[in-house]
Amino acid sequence: MKKILVLGSCGQIGTELVLTLREKFGSENVVAADLKDACPENLSNGPYIQLDALNKESVRSYIIDQKFSDVYLLAALLSATAEKNPDFAWKLNMESLFIILDLAKEGHISKIFWPSSIAVFGPTTPRIKTPQYTVMEPSTVYGISKQAGERWCEYYFNKFGVDVRSIRYPGLISYKSLPGGGTTDYAVDIYYKAKAGEHFTCFLKEDTALPMMFMDDAIRATIELMEAPKEQVKIRSSYNLSALSFTPKQIFETIKKIIPSFSIEYQPDFRQAIADSWPASIDDSYARENWGWKESYDLDKTTMEMLNNL
Ligand code: VAH
């Protein structure tokens, strides 16, 4: 019987994962866990526990006691925040992973999902249709931690048979949960400003193309990967995954078609250098071949969904 723990469930991905997993496997079988003492309103349709992903003793005793089949570890500092707090970013992103990998190695967890990111690629990586296997010299603390984490996931699979699965997420666009501390967050904020009838100041240049995806596609991909037969999961570092690639100018134009009065200006900040080090688009042919991935939201459909639901 599926019993699932989502650690870091109050984040942009975690929130939507909990809601979708509860719909699929039953609310009582999906425990949401995060640092917050009180369960957030939008996760109150099922069990919640306050748990610090870095508190090894409490994470270990809870998981050993509760006998979860699957653990989704989403706790992390993202790219922009990690640059401001490198020591803690490395500690949180890495130590939380080792705690969960070791629990699986000891037989207390059957399957782990751990998110990587296109941030594992760096300025020397080919930027257009970035391949699954290529030069990876990340220049951000976040990207370095995700690249190291991928190596450890593959090591624990090869050495100890730990069934850990991972996706290199692009920037994610959602309306049910806010992003936090990312370089791609402009692609969410732009919809909030448009819907509120406000002018939008973009922290990236108008021609900065980045890989992106609507959250419903990202959540579906995550669950499809986790439910795929083991032998289909041939990559145990992390899968490239792709749906969209667009610039701030392009997303602005899809919104302006629906809200003609919407206006934008571009004031690049420190996040421009992070974005410039990342791919513009991703080749995800291994995910498509190995476990049948296919996106369903293009940019116009994403804009329609966002403006209709905000
Ligand atoms: C970030 N949203 O901006 C995350 C993601 C590819 C970007 O990893 O840091």
Image (cartoon, helix red, strand yellow):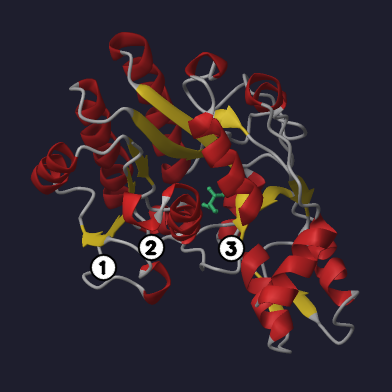
Q: Is residue 147 above or below residue 34?
A: above
Residue reaching furthest to the top: 159
Query: Does the beta carbon of the residue at mark 2 sit less than 8 Å from ligand 1?
Result: no
For mark 3, what is the residue? 185
For mark 1, what is the residue? 36
Q: Position of residue 58 (x, y in %)?
A: 11, 48
| Front-lying residue, 185 or 288 | 288
Where does the C terminus fall, quadrant-wise?
A: bottom right
Which residue type does callout 3 highlight? Asp
Query: Does the beta carbon of the residue at mark 3 sit less than 8 Å from ligand 1?
Result: yes
Label 2 SS: loop
Characterize the local packing of mark 2: few (<14), some (14-19) or many (20 or more) Cα atoms within 10 angstroms: many
| Front-lying residue, 235 or 120 | 235
Where does the N terminus fall, quadrant-wise?
A: top left
Residue 168 seen from this side: no
Q: Is residue 115 above or below residue 177?
A: above
Q: Position of residue 113 (x, y in %)?
A: 41, 36
Q: Position of residue 250 (x, y in %)?
A: 84, 61
Q: Residue at x 24, y 73 (%)?
A: 38
Q: Are marks 2 and 1 in contact (CB under 8 Å)?
A: yes
